[in-house]
Image (cartoon, helix red, strand yellow):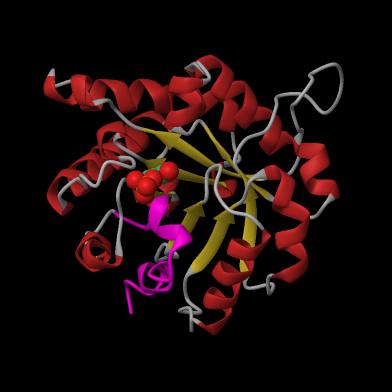
Amino acid sequence: MPRKFVVGGNWKMNGDKNMINEIINNMKKGPLDKEVEVIIGVPSIYLTYVKSIVPDTIQVAAQNCWKVPKGAFTGEISPAMLKDIGVNWVIIGHSERRTIFHEDDTLVAEKVAHALESGMKVIACIGETLEEREAGKTEEVVFRQTQALVPAIGDKWANVVLAYEPVWAIGTGKTASPQQAQDVHASLRNWLANNVSAQVADAVRIQYGGSVTAANAVELASCADIDGFLVGGASLKPEFVNIVNATK
Ligand code: PEP
């Protein structure tokens, strides 16, 4: 079965109601390729508002969640709360969470496990720093990060999208070349075949993220193992429509 192209937008901590209206109106005008799954990652405070104005064809994700359903965790939100407001996707393990908020592989895995057990779908992010790439450790790092997710995901791979996001390419304007991205995606798929199953390796969608724009999306999208994008800065701009349509 061919893998359905999946494009996520990660708004990060950006936007207000005016800007959100503009972004959503632009996406509604599109037109967005109907063959592509589109998921926008919205600041938690605007999730309900965005849910109330988007068409069903655009799915909505939280950018984070905690690892238990409820309790004394000031400032956190749980998958149960997200599901309660109709949000079925969550981005977990973004490099900004890992770096700025010190989320390690273990915590990321616990969050992934709980989100999946709660019936949510997860975009799980992995990726190496520039230092790690320059030290020739890209594969070691992304395999380690993925290994940590394997027991957390269990048999729920159908509800997971992996996002390979080299940290040096996020928000920097430096995109991985299509060859660099394709090489890591192919290695990951090979690792999954050897460490999970051939079926998972074949079916799981691996997004590329890191300074994707309308100008580089078409070439990146043509790579055999790139099944979509996770888009930060450009997801706030009208060009997001072109990125969604990159395989057309
Ligand atoms: C991201 O936030 O996941 C991302 C890839 O950001 P940008 O597209 O701005 O590099």
The reply to whether residue 124 is visible in this rendering is yes
- The location of residue 221, given as percent across then percent down, is 27, 63
Residue at the image position 55 percent from the left and 68 percent from the top: 23
When the figure is inspected, residue 158 is found, relative to residue 6, above or below; the finding is: above
Q: Report the quarter where the N terminus lies.
A: bottom left
Lateral position of residue 225 relative to residue 219, left or right: right
- The location of residue 66, given as percent across then percent down, is 70, 27
- The location of residue 179, given as percent across then percent down, is 13, 49
Residue at the image position 74 percent from the left and 27 percent from the top: 76
The reply to whether residue 87 is visible in this rendering is no
User: Residue 92 falls in which quadrant of the image?
Assistant: top right
When the figure is inspected, residue 138 is found, relative to residue 237, above or below; the finding is: above
Magenta stretch encompasses residue 230: yes
Lateral position of residue 154 relative to residue 243, left or right: right
30 or 137, nearer to the observer: 30
Residue at the image position 63 percent from the left and 50 percent from the top: 61
Q: Report the quarter where the C terminus lies.
A: bottom left
Magenta stretch encompasses residue 221: no
112 or 31, nearer to the observer: 31
Span of residues in magenta = 226-248
Quadrant position of ligand 1: top left
Lateral position of residue 170 relative to residue 93, left or right: left
When the figure is inspected, residue 231 is found, relative to residue 110, above or below; the finding is: below
- The location of residue 68, given as percent across then percent down, is 77, 24
Instruction: Give the total of numbered labels.
Output: 0
